[in-house]
Amino acid sequence: MSDVYRDAIERLSHVPGVRGALIVDMGAGVPVTAEVETGISPDALAALAAALYERTARASDAAGFGALSTFHLEAEGGHVVMAGAGDLVLIALVDDDAQLGRVRLETQRAAETLQ
């Protein structure tokens, strides 16, 4: 794993409330690198997140909103925050009570380092 990828994952993993972080190859839907809690399948999460991000990016463009920068999925047990970085997408798994503004900011900053 390259230092840039490791640094991006570590940056996100140290934000309070982040339970895991992944860098995913959007085209293949597979993790390039991941740091997630035990019991979370990085492969399944990568495939789902890549598909969601890619389809949402196309919908955003078709709706005239322009390029997608971040995508936030809110669920009963927490959040998934994603930011695109070229052919990669950076994913943060976040507790329900985390400071989402900080998580989004750090996700975007980390994604910028991957471009």
Image (cartoon, rainbow, N blue to C red):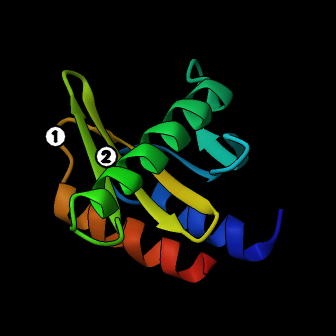
Residue at 67% x, 40% y is 29
The answer to whether residue 52 shows anywhere in this view is yes
Q: Is residue 56 left or right of residue 111?
A: left
Q: CA distance from mark 2 to mark 1?
A: 7 Å
Amino acid type, residue under disc 2 in the picture: Gly
Q: Quadrant of residue 30?
A: top right
Classify 12 as above or below 96. below
Identify the image quadrant of residue 114. bottom right
Q: Is residue 14 visible?
A: no
Asked whether disc 2 touches disc 1, contact meaning CB atoms under 8 Å apart, the reply is yes
Q: Is residue 16 left or right of residue 42?
A: left
Residues packed near mark 2 inside 10 Å, few (<14), some (14 to 19) or many (20 plus): some
Where residue 10 sits: x, y (%)?
58, 63
Q: Along the line of sight, which residue is nearer the eye, 38 or 110?
A: 110
Residue at the spot x=62%, y=44% of the render? 35
Q: Which residue is mark 1?
A: 97
Residue placed under numbered mark 2 in the picture: 17
| Image position of 37 with respect to 33: above or below | above
Identify the image quadrant of the N terminus: bottom right
Quadrant hosting residue 46: top right
Q: Quadrant of the C terminus?
A: bottom right
- Name the element at disc 2: loop
Residue lying at 64% horizontally and 64% vertically, measured from the top left = 87
- Above or below for 50 versus 32: above
Residue at 29% from the left image edge and 72% from the top image edge = 66
**Element type where label 1 sits in the image:** loop
Place of residue 107 in the rendered image (x, y in percent of width and height, measured from the top left): 40, 65
Residue 21 point in image, percent of width and height: 53, 49
For badge 1, the amino acid type reads Asp
